Image (cartoon, helix red, strand yellow):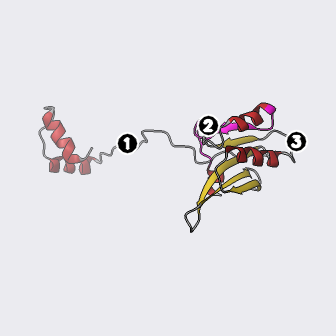
Amino acid sequence: MPIRTLSLYAQRIGRVFASATTWAKLVRQRRWRRPRRRAYPEKPKTGIRATYPNEYWHIDLTVIRLLDDTKCYLHAVIDNFSRRILSWRLSKRLAPTTMCEILKEAAKNFDQTPTVVADSGVENVNTGVDRLMADGVIRRLLAQVEVSFSNTMIEAF
């Protein structure tokens, strides 16, 4: 707390009757310093790091507003390891099935089951994507829900 507040508080509880200038002089003379510890632990700065290609994929939807005030919806899948865009689709309407289509398109060339990191939007959490998970095409992790970090790699794209 500030020195003035500290002096008023000490007077109010009846411990020390000293002015703020006296407190400031004592702080300087005795080199009293407050501990500068964080109240909460630091958030992790690094997200998921893949050790091989197609271990983790990031998916998201971006709304692009055009000059004539119409909207386009860009769905994209990006690989964490190589930072390569595996599949994308631009559509005029927001349809949850579009994400399923690009996930199938991205997964058709690979044998292994990737872990897909997604936010909890309606385009990523729906029956079509749940069916892909049940079929073993993908595994899904919800960013900021099932894991503590965000989906920044695809957000930056």
> Residue visible at 80% across and 45% down?
104
Amino acid type shown at disc 3: Asp
Location of residue 56 in the rendering, given as x and y in whole percent from the top left corner: 74, 44
Q: Which mark is residue 111?
A: 3
Residue at x-position 78% and y-position 41%: 114
Near mark 1 (Cα within 10 A), the count class, few <14, some 14-19 or many ≥20, is: few
Indicate the amino acid at tag 2. Answer: Val
Above or below for 130 versus 30: above
Q: Disc 1 marks which residue?
A: 35
In percent of width and height, residue 19 lies at 13, 46
Q: Position of residue 91 (x, y in %)?
A: 69, 56
Judged from the image, the secondary structure of the residue bearing numbered disc 2 is loop
Decide whether residue 119 is among the magenta residues.
no
Magenta stretch: give its range: 135-151
Closer to the camera, 77 or 38?
77
> Does residue 26 appear in this view?
no
Q: Secondary structure at mark 1?
A: loop
Q: Separation of disc 3 and disc 1 at Cα?
A: 54 Å
Q: Which residue is mark 2?
A: 147
Instruction: Say which residue appears at 81% left-offset and 33% top-offset.
Output: 135
* Whole-percent x, y for residue 134 in the image: 77, 31
Residue 32 visible (yes or no): yes
